[in-house]
Amino acid sequence: MLARGVRAFGDGFVSLLLPLYLLALGFTPLQVGLVATTTLFGSGLLTLLAGLHAWRFPTRALLLAACALMGATGVGLAVLRDFWPLMLVAFVGTVNPSGGDVSVFLPLEHALLSRSVSDRERTAVFARYSMVGTLSAAAGALCAGLPAWAAPALGASQLTALQGMFLLYAGLAGIAALVYRGLRARQAQAEEEPRSALGPSRRRVYMLAALFSLDAFGGGFIVQSLVALWLFQRFGLPLATAGSIFFWMGLLTALSYLVAARLSARIGLVNTMVFTHLPSSLCLLAIPWCAELWQAVALLFVRSALSQMDVPTRSSYVMAIVTPAERAAAASVTAVPRSLAAAASPALAGWLLGMSTFGWPLIAGGATKIVYDLLLLAMFSRVRPPEEARLRRELSTPAHGRSASPAPGAPRPLPPP
């Protein structure tokens, strides 16, 4: 949790400062876009490779190596000024322009968290893990304004202040490495467990990866910057007001993670993902029809309180329906396609906004996400984690005098680790 918070804090300010820094170096907007795209694809590829091959190496060693790469990324961004060397750093480094956590750390931490707690605690742990990351990234984003304050106060140029922030990012990598060194005793025990790439759960993981990619493609229509642009076009929303609105939206999202953990204990992981996601998607469909700003903002708040409750439950579900040996590979295979799919739709959303102020990107995003919800419910509602199956048997035995058993032909849950 601590290491996640440290890394998310750095991602929060670097994702905002990177394009400004490249422009300050004299790069064109096209070159800035190329660096951002290269960063996204490089992070996704490295994450995928880490997940598929993590079983060959000790997890602690891989985490420390990832910290070294994070530190080298920060130093490289601070000292290099030519386009092609920066493109290389963008491809092999750990910076993600979206501010999210699609990085080499993700599959390693997900696997480590899953085998560090009991099945009943896993969803709650992932909820706290997601909340720490969201709040830390928000705090990092607030610190993106430090160069504008520090440059005149220290008598330095704006470019020098920006380079200092990248060196701070490298320093955060050192702090994260110190945290990971504390895994020594726990890791010695964890490495006794067998680990492998995807095996018996391959089909399930690939199906989930395809579904999650569909959801991410829909989410690309409604990224924060495009929603803010639509609010400005439709209602003339001031910039200061937009900042306040999105701050409270982020706070509602962070708090919803804790609610998701409690709700999933009652109705199950898949039901929590679907039955919280569907209303949020319906809110998206309704927003373009709002005649007043307060109506649109109210629906955005409702959506923020519901739309991300599937984040910790999704991570917990993936870890639950695969064998312990496959968890690192499953985490990367389901996370990376989401990042790549989300990169495909913002350009289309911008084109739609250029054609009309009605809010067609919100319609497209909401409709795509509803299709994802219905497919997920149809394909995985009966694929339950072992702890859910045990809980259902416990609840059904006193009432009916017998243990509940799956219907003929229904997928049976995997045995507990």
Image: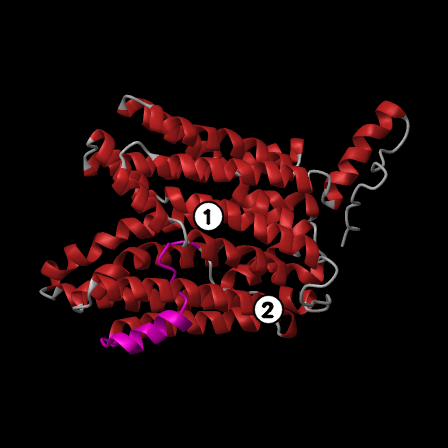
Res 186 → quadrant: bottom right
Question: Magenta stretch: residue 95 in it?
Answer: yes
Dot 1: element: helix
Tag 2 residue: 59
Residue 414: where, in percent of width, then height?
77, 50
Q: Which residue is drawn at 32% across and 57% down?
A: 15
Question: Which quadrant of the figure has residue 165?
Answer: bottom left
Q: Give the range drawn in magenta.
A: 79-100
Please rate how many residues cluster around mark 1, counting C-alpha atoms within 10 Å: few if below 14, some from 14 to 19, many from 20.
many
Residue 101 position in % (x across, y down):
45, 56
Q: Nearer the viewer, residue 195 or 350?
A: 350
Name the quadrant containing residue 405: top right
Badge 2 amino acid = Thr
Q: How far apart are marks 2 and 1 (CA)?
A: 31 Å
Quadrant for the C terminus in the image: bottom right
Residue drawn at 54 percent across, 65 percent down: 48
Q: Which residue is drawn at 77% across and 34% down?
A: 392
Residue 38, placed above or below residue 205: below
Q: Nearer the viewer, mark 2 or mark 1?
A: 1
Q: Is residue 190 above or below residue 384?
A: below
Front one among 342 and 389: 342
Query: Residue at label 1?
Result: 217
Residue most toward the right?
401
Say which amino acid is labelled 1: Phe
